[in-house]
Image: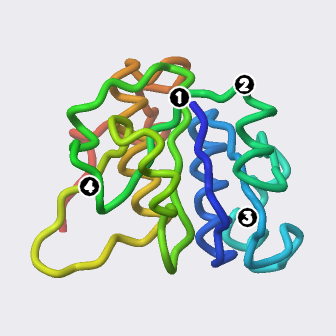
Amino acid sequence: MNIVLLEPEIPANTGNIGRTCVATGTALHLIRPLGFDISDKAVRRAGMDYWKSLDLHVYDSWEDFNEKNGNPKVYMATTKGQHLYTDTHYENDAFIMFGKESAGIPEEILMSSPDTCVRIPMIGEIRSLNLANSVAVLLYEALRQNNFEGMNMCGELHRHKWSDIKKD
């Protein structure tokens, strides 16, 4: 899987998204301009010690991203999307893009491929979810559709069995 952040502005969001990418074996693609320096302490703090394990790609522009990736099919998360994120089939190497926190993905990019624009349903007049939360929602749906390929499916309890744990 591939997560694409178009002009992200908040370092803590990008750090958290980077950590999610490492935990899921997902590449993170950042498209400039960035609202922070990648070496920023806030990015590293949010990504913790996982940042060094991140499969990170940085591009100078949307055009640069498309050129270097062979104009891939890109699913675009937007409140303007006509399709629910759960009604879309994501390939196991899908590119899922999110726009900057203050403005989302520019309309001219959205209009270039309206069929790949997806939305997370929300109630009322809520503008949008936090970027890192939105990435997690869509990424895990895409991973679920691909049977969580290559991921640990069961945890281990080393000290106790669930039945042995006492409730207070």
Residue 6 screen position, x and y as percent: 63, 59
Circle 4 residue? 120
**Where in the figure is residue 57, as x and y percent of width and height?**
80, 44
Q: Could you tell me how many numbered marks the image carries?
A: 4
- Whether pointer 2 and pointer 3 mark residues with C-beta atoms closer than 8 Å, the reply is no
Circles 1, 4 touching at the beta carbon (< 8 Å): no
Closer to us: 76 or 139: 76
Residue 70: image tag: 2
Residue under label 1: 73
Please name the amino acid that badge 3 sits on: Met
Q: Which comes before the other along the chain, label 2 or label 3?
A: 3
Q: For the residue labelled by badge 2, is the local secondary structure a helix, a strand or a loop?
A: loop
Name the residue carrying label 3.
48
* Mark before the other along the chain sequence, 4 or 3: 3
Density class for disc 4 (Cα within 10 Å; few <14, some 14-19, many ≥20) is some
First in sequence, mark 1 or 4: give its number. Answer: 1
For the residues labelled 1 and 3, the Cα–Cα distance comes to: 31 Å
Q: Secondary structure at mark 3?
A: helix
Quadrant (top left/top right/bottom left/bottom right) for the N terminus: top right
Residue kind at label 2, given as amino acid type: Gly
